[in-house]
Image (cartoon, rainbow, N blue to C red):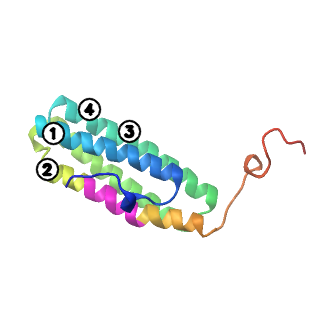
Amino acid sequence: MWIEWDETLSVGHEAMDREHRAMVTVIRRLFEENGKQPGSPAVQRLLDELLAETRAHFASEEALMREVGYTDTEEHRDEHAALLTELQVVLERARKSPESITIDTLSFITTWFTDHVRVADLALAQFIEDGGPVIRSRAFSEPSGASA
C-alpha cells in the first residue's frame, strides 16, 4: 500500500505532523528501494532509519502526553510499545532473510502507521486542541528572561 502525505494524515498539531511527514518519507523510500531490489542493504538501512524515527517520534509524543496531562497516556504508550516490537520483528526478519521483505510487509508498516496516526495520535491532538488538563512549567508560563 503506497503512502503519500496528505491532509487525511494531519492531526492538526504542528510538531506531530512534521514528525509524521518525516516517517511517511522514510516509508515511501522503503517502497521505492524494495521495488528496485527487495531486501537489499539499502532497504535494511531504511528499516533501521524508520525504527530510529519511530522511537524518536514516540518519545516526543510521550513527553507531550506528560506535558499536557493526557488522560489516555498509558494506553497510547502501550500501543507505541507494541508497534515498536512489531517493527523490530520485521527488521530482524529482514536481517536474517532479506527476501522476506515483501509488499505485504511494507503494506503492514503503512497500515500500522496510518491507523495509529488516524486514531491514537488524532485523539491526542484533539485532547490538546480541546484544552484538556495542561501541566505548565515555569518556562512555558513566563517569557524567557522574565524576572520573578
Name the residue that disc number 4 marks: 45
Which kind of residue does numbered mark 1 sit on? Asn
Magenta-drawn segment: 110-119
Which residue was labeled with disc 2? 103
Cβ–Cβ under 8 Å for marks 2 and 1: yes
The answer to whether residue 114 is magenta is yes
Residue 54, how many percent across, how many down?
Answer: 39, 45
Q: Is residue 91 magenta?
A: no
Task: Identify which residue is drawn at 44% across, 46% down.
Answer: 19
Element marked by disc 2: helix
Q: Which residue is mark 1?
A: 34
Which residue lies under the disc numbered 3?
Answer: 52
Q: CA distance from mark 3 to mark 1?
A: 19 Å
- Say whether residue 19 is left or right of residue 93: right
Instruction: Indicate the position of residue 93 as horizontal and vertical percent values.
Output: 18, 42
Task: Give whichever of discs 3 and 1 has the lower sequence position.
Answer: 1
Q: Secondary structure at mark 4?
A: helix
Q: Earlier in the sequence, mark 3 or mark 4?
A: 4
Quadrant housing residue 80: bottom left
